[in-house]
Amino acid sequence: MAKTYRTTLPRRLGNVAFTAALKAGLVPPYAVLTTRGRTSGRPRSTPVRVMKHVGRRYLVAPYGTVDWVRNARAAGEVTLRRGRHTTPYAVVECPPDEAGAVLKAYVRAEPITRPYFDARPSDPQAAFAAEADRHPVFRLEPR
């Protein structure tokens, strides 16, 4: 059964405060993700955790197919900002087997998002691969 994830006012306010701290470069391993709006073409920003796994960088959508995911799919590229440093990346959506390993690592690293996953940290990687359609994972490729 698919879960519905809603952005609440407290979460939006928290994102505003968190984004300000990120723009100041105060909160690694997080960054400000900017995508081009798929309909408006205007830049859209949100805070994200950049996951490092097996020497590569990934973006995980713990709340499902939200707007930044749709925008990244449409544009095929994103920009990450940490402090004054901005880096453009091409994004490649991962197949379930690759996404499963990253999702398992993500759930261990970000306990606050665990309620949005059916799989538990102790579950095998296959349980996370089964959730890859509900929690998209993007590999970041430098441009």
Image (cartoon, helix red, strand yellow):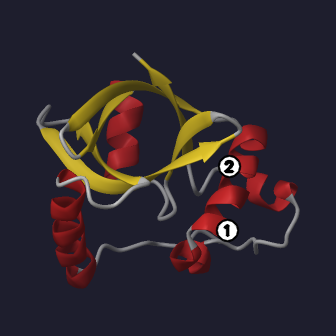
| Residue 74, placed above or below residue 44 | above
- Badge 1 marks a residue whose secondary structure is helix
Residue placed under numbered mark 1 in the picture: 108
Q: Nearer the viewer, residue 91 or 39?
A: 91
**N-term mark: 2 or 1:** 2
- Residue 119's disc is none
- Residue 35 lies, in percent from the top left, at 26, 37
| Whether residue 129 is visible | yes
Residue lying at 26% horizontally and 54% vertically, measured from the top left: 46
Residue lying at 61% horizontally and 76% vertically, measured from the top left: 114
Which quadrant of the structure image shows residue 18?
Answer: bottom left
Residue lying at 85% horizontally and 55% vertically, measured from the top left: 126
Does residue 12 appear left or right of residue 101 in this picture?
left
Residue placed under numbered mark 2 in the picture: 102
- Badge 2 marks a residue whose secondary structure is helix
Q: Residues within 10 Å of mark 2 (few under 14, many from 20)?
A: many
- Residue 32 lies, in percent from the top left, at 27, 49
Which quadrant of the structure image shows residue 54?
Answer: top right
Residue sitting at the far bottom: 10
Quadrant in the picture for the C terminus? top left
Q: Residues within 10 Å of mark 1 (few under 14, many from 20)?
A: some
- Residue 52 lies, in percent from the top left, at 59, 44
Residue sitting at the far front: 26
Q: Amino acid at mark 1?
A: Arg
Q: Nearer the viewer, residue 68 or 17?
A: 17
- Residue 77 lies, in percent from the top left, at 36, 26
Tell me whether the residue at label 2 lies in contact with that at label 1, contact meaning CB atoms closer than 8 angstroms.
no
Alpha carbon separation for disc pair 2 and 1 = 10 Å
Q: Amino acid at mark 2?
A: Val
| Residue 141, placed above or below residue 118 | above
Residue lying at 24% horizontally and 35% vertically, measured from the top left: 85
